[in-house]
Image (cartoon, rainbow, N blue to C red):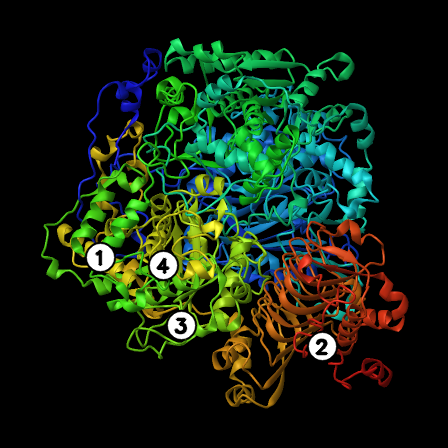
Amino acid sequence: MRLSNFYLLGLAAPLVTYAFLPQSLKTPTQQALREPVSNNVDTPTFWPQDECSSTQLKMAFDDSKPSNMFDGPMALTKERDACGVGFIANTKSGEEFGTHRVVQQGLSALTCMEHRGACGGDSISGDGAGMMTQIPWKLFDEYRSDDCPQPGVGMIFLPMDDEKRDAVKSKIEEVCTANELRFVGWREVPVDPDVLGPLAREAMPSIWQFFVKAPERLDNDDKSRDGFERTLYLIRRRFSVELENAGLVWDDSETYVASLSSRTIVYKGMVQSAVLSTFYKDLTNPDYTSKFAIYHRRFSTNTNPRWPLAQPMRVLGHNGEINTLLGNVNWMKARERSKSLECDIDSDLVDYDSTENIVTMCDTQDIPDFLEPVVDLGRSDSANLDSVFQLMTQSRHRAPCALMAMVPTAYMENPDLNKNPEITDFYKFHGGLLEAWDGPALLVFSDGKSIGASLDRNGLRPARYSIAKDGSVYMMSETGVIPDLEEADIVEKGRLGPGQMINVDLETGEFKDNIGIKSEIASRHPYGEWMKKHRKEITKTEANDDRLYDDNTATFAQATFGWGLEDIGMQIQDMAGSAKETTYSMGDDAPIAALSEKPHPLYNYFKQRFAQVTNPPIDPLREGVVMSLAMTLGRKESIYKVSEDGARLIHLESPILNSVEMDQIATLAEETNGSFIQATVSTRYSLADGPAGIEAALDAMCDQAVEDVKNGAEVLILSDKAADQSVLDETTYVPPLIAVGAVHHRLIDEGLRMDTGIVVETGAAWSTHHFACLVGYGANAVHPYLALETVKQWHGQPRTQKMMKAGKLAEITVAKAQENYRTAVENGMLKILSKIGISLLTSYSGAQIFEALGLGDEVIARSFKGTTSRIGGVSLEDIASETVLMRPEALKEKMKLVNYGYYKPVPALGEYHINSSDLAKRLHDAIGMDKKVSAATNRDELDNDGVKPKSVANYEIFQKSLETAPLANIRDLLEFDSDRESISIDEVEPASQIMRRFCTGAMSLGALSREAHETLAIAVNRIGGKSNSGEGGEDVLRNKPIEDVDENGRSASFPHLAGLKNGDSANSFVHQVASGRFGVTPEFLVTAKQLEIKMAQGAKPGEGGQLPGPKVSEYIAGLRASKPGVTLISPPPHHDIYSIEDLAQLIHDLHAVNERAGVSVKLVSCVGIGTVACGVAKADADVIQISGGDGGTGASPLSSIKHAGCPWELGLSEAHSALLNNNLRDRVTIRVDGGIRTGLDVMVGAMLGAEEFGFGTIAMIAEGCVMARVCHLNTCPVGVTSQKEELRKKFPGTPEHVVNFFEFVGEEVRSLLATLGYKSLEEVIGRADLLKTSEKQAGRVAKTKSMNLDPFFSGVPNSKDDRSFLKAKMAGGIEVPKEEIVHVNGFSSDLDRKVCANEDVKKVIADNEGEVSVSYKILNTDRSTGAMLSGDIARAHGNNGFNGKVNVQFEGSAGQSFGSYTLPGLSLKLVGEANDYVGKGMHGGEITVVPSPDAGFVAAESSIVGNACLYGATGGDFHANGRAGERFGVRNSGAFAVAEGAGDHCCEYMTGGVVAILGSAGRNIGAGMTGGIGYFYDKDGDFEDKLNGEIVKMQRLVTDEGEAQLKSMIERHFELTGSEKADEILSDWENEKQLFWQIYPPSETKSPIVTEGAEAGDLRISASAPNGDMCFLPVGGQMSPEQTQRCAD
């Protein structure tokens, strides 16, 4: 193994390069090899939960300074939330001040959404609940007067201490009086503290109200009292400043103004929903009347939430998460700094005009002695959003207008807006001025003048509404939450679709739908005319063929910027040749950049952040319609005062600019063409300046940028372009990421950032990750001149031309190759945005959504302010040195590029890769494997199937090779530091006990061959560990033990396997449920011992799984209910796990269908994972898995493998610590995986908090993998990852090989435990005090010298003495092993239990014959109804073996996941309505949903079921007499469904089944649909605009079979539901049928339903109908004779 660090590389450099070496590199350093280590484990000793956050052990890690483990924005690392939210408005009942009934209904609705919230660590204190209403003037009558009938009312949380409270009250009065508010008095709010939980009671503030009259000087106020409201707003922001100045701010007691207004008031607290009205006695007082109520129930990931974090906030109730928060905050700071009017403590906060000027023209962010800041990363995302929204409403924006600008809809090519161009123009105009606050969000808002709700552009939050006859409007996260709302009183039921808004004018009572309110707002200004006059468009233009450099100069330039041969041979070839990012496999087993002995571009020190649990990723492949990469350049005008000047911007279609487009931008500087002044700042500096020169160069660059912008530059170009070879020889450059970050932040500080756009012109950007980093740190656009030059160079190479001529590459022009490259970069950027749930590049710009690994504080402070960097690292000088070490002369490679081997291993000279073919051979030698022995050779002739005796000596060689290898992982910098003497190994628990904690990684059947997948399962089951199915499902054959094994270890059931034993089980212990829902059937779920929800995958977090088409064989397609040969790219996890409360719902679903199985949730290490883990624990998960970002994969985009996800050492420590600190650690088991290979890794993982350990790639190696790294190509030479029959026969592994490996690891753990003096692995779990930083290891690579792990790892709480977290707590304080119990659902499954306990139902299931019908009432709090019954049937009879019939009718409003996992023989009918996820995982049977017979609304025009219905359905029949929500039929692979309308993304990623929509549908129909048929009724003639035609085609009913299928389905629908819409269509069939479109993917073209004359295929009209039976419908039922006759006909 070659050891070379920068020192050795530096010696090869000429003197000019040597000048760049930091001092540490000029002195030879000892190359310390990793020493053999011994290690630890420990037994429980018990400690009280309430001490886990405060007790701190003096650890081996230096804890003299505060830990940085949870450093970062509060909304990222400390507090995330989700919720249920809604509003009620009735302006027409009651008198001037409304009715008490509105308040009562709001409280009832709040109580019915309790399940969308959560409780604190005491399981009693709510995470937060609250209500905003109109001020109850009848209740406050004594504080009103003739001269001020509606005073300002403040709701304030004060200290409980009398002295402190009186001091604060005095100061509040003083501030009010000083600003001419006439103080009326205080009122102590009547409360009942006895109803609070312990945590809430302990944190409870003293709650008061105060009343102030409007200043007399405000006699010119307008009718709606806007001036008074502005004065109250500004004075509220003064309170905190004055309290701070007076020394009245304390850590242990918080003063918080929940509301201060003359219109609205907020009652909220750390309570459960039902407790709010018993705690606040006002709310039950009949005199508490209002015209509206906003209600909110919170689910926090933190168990110690604070009272002020409850919602509603002051103007908003927010369900969601703002993914762009850091960028939004930075841009708000820049926007405020750019305001021109001076303000100070003497500014007039009373005068009408003065207050308007302060709000619109003064920097109110940065005057700490005047007003509290508008935005602050110490607040939650909801609080910051609320603050900016309130600022905008105070600046004379109407509330709907402000929200339209802040949270825009996806207006681009939106067919719903075709008739309203004014709305599109509004969004275009404001999109140029204000970056979106992007992320999943349902926002309910009121400024007291109107009330409304708006949904984010992706529609990833449920939002239903109803309108009653009396004018009441009810909006809610779930339908059915208003118990006394009669169906007969409702005239309309609807839902908010993606980006939609509704609004109620509280003065007139007028209800305005989405188009109504937006058109009204958008028509206030001629935005379209303004943009036509002033806006300049730079559209994509064909690049030219002109070369910038000759080949030698180009190669030299490439080398100086860090290019390697792989970058051209892999990335450029794929991107320029096929317009796609490179796909690769096996994960990232190279060292992180901070530990690498090779020089790395600075980008490699950054890891992309991604969404998991609290917010969803987006699907850029199928839902790209909501995304945009468009950017702008130029000066951005104020958002507070709309003017024509705001349209004067340069609009870029793409952020990736070629030279032609750069020239076009240059022409815009001309006076006749816009006068957009431009300036170029060079980022190059002299090599002779040495590494210290980077600081001076950076200073000069920032100074010049400031001067240029002050002089009017609206386009600022940061360029490292060298004119020729001589410049390249004499200069180096500031890495563009350092440059753009520094300039961006300097311009913000100077108040100039809004005055210019930044273009980075660089040779150091070629990968999608590079572009994402540059834009993420402030660039508006990038001109990658050298990447485009390289494309030209590549195109002209003889090898490329030969490949084109041979047909291996498409024959393309140079211009086309450059456009292909840009397309690949753009698609890659969309993928990176989508991972974190961001739709718009304008929102990603400056958002800094990365974590730095290995960068020092000075670097972060200079260029990356706000970015988390928790382990320290390199300085600016080190970066300068590393940059120069990439120069050709430093590497003796003057005219050719180096192959760094960052992706593919390069023997001897390339980057170190842990999983090498050499490592595989060493392990094979140890476990007795000969990879030449297989079914394809002579295995049957050899003793023991050719398995040789395992060799301890060879395992020690394997161990030693890893111990002495180059540094690769953070754990390599740690060593053990025991507090005990060694003991005899005989005293240590046996390896058999240790191995029970071992698991295999979630590797799917499909990614692996049958042989590999089943061998792993059998082996791990033998050792008592936990095998994992991965996301592809499993053959039902594997559910039972293997009992037909002969004396040769062969089984007729599994003839492809060797080395079997009777009693072996191939059934994986853990069955995975992933976003693609592949293989998820009722039987798959009930035969699992544990069910795993895959939230993220280590190799590509934020993305779905990927299985290349050649690997989708007939067998694999059958298991996955998909089409053979069609590539499967799963959606990212967002359909039913797009927030913490929805993850809780999926956990609930799984606990319902299989109560005996625990549920695990797989997360990937990243900053903030601790607070995410807390939320998962509170959602009733049993196991939390923390995966490292280096996990393996069968196929993934290369940039995802390399640049997303962090080492598990960080994520594991943070999750374990956060769970301990929040008293949740005893609720869950923590599992860790990602590059775990040895007992040493197991020991470190245990000490950092893990109880179980996953082995992925190394387990594959143990069954024969040779690390060929061709998993994605289906050409694995040993059949481990291939579906080709001839290659599978070469599979050499047996279960014994894998068992041998695990036994070695178990014995290694025992040895380490003995050396450390511990008797069991349990004893060392969580004992981070037994670890310390290894000085020897840290000295091996120069880059690690400034790294400091202590601030991070010292944050792991003390668990030496109290070990109670290792046991689960039962009622009464009883402690039991966690593996012996699982969570069970509470009252929300009681209805399901009642159905299952029905004796008649039980008898039909037990007898497997007969029929039973039962009926029940249902509420929205009854969730997953039907899942338990399905589970009982599946356990007894499997997926399709039930011959009885169970009919269950429900009446009412069903909760989420109604009818989940139904199977043949089960029929569910719901009379009423349902929420999201109806029919999730449906496998058979029938679900029918019809409105109440008393309904007063038109069923076909009203919403009856929610979003993502039939998600992952594999069979069954579904009929809804009403409209469905978004993503209807997503991933349907077998259900036959009829609904009378649907939202966006209908039939998304469908692979089978039939969907018929009898009304209008939203946009993006059929996206990613690769199987099945869709029928769509198109009365408005706009269907083509709504279809995603990338895969599917559309046609009319061209075949008799297709017509018959559709007609029969509608007839069936009519019979089951009595649908008036179906009746109308059938009554005029010959005309109506012409309004239907049929959609189909290529896989269905041979079906007679699609193509005339095609061979007979599947002609069913029902999932339960026999094939070809077009007359399936039974005659009779409840239809009239005429209807029955028509069905029979």
Which residue matches tag 3?
1054
Q: CA distance from mark 2 to mark 3?
A: 34 Å
Q: CA distance from mark 1 to mark 4?
A: 16 Å
Residue at screen point 40% across, 39% down: 904
Sequence-wise, which precedes: disc 2 or disc 3?
3
Q: CA distance from mark 1 to mark 2?
A: 58 Å
Q: What count of labels does the image hold? A: 4
Sequence-wise, which precedes: disc 1 or disc 4?
4
Element under disc 4: strand
Q: Amino acid at mark 4?
A: Thr
Residue at screen point 35% across, 50% down: 1266
Which residue matches tag 4?
1000
Q: CA distance from mark 2 to mark 4?
A: 44 Å
Sequence-wise, which precedes: disc 1 or disc 2?
1
Q: Is residue 215 visible?
A: no
Element under disc 3: loop
Q: Amino acid at mark 2?
A: Gly
Q: Amino acid at mark 3?
A: Phe
Element under disc 2: loop
CB within 8 Å, label 1 to label 3: no
- Local packing at callout 3 (Cα closer than 10 Å; few below 14, some 14-19, many 20+) is some
Which residue matches tag 2?
1668
Q: Quadrant of residue 100?
A: bottom right
Q: Amino acid at mark 1?
A: Phe
Tell me if 1606 is positioned left or right of 1351 in this view. right
- Local packing at callout 4 (Cα closer than 10 Å; few below 14, some 14-19, many 20+) is many
- Local packing at callout 1 (Cα closer than 10 Å; few below 14, some 14-19, many 20+) is many
- Local packing at callout 2 (Cα closer than 10 Å; few below 14, some 14-19, many 20+) is some
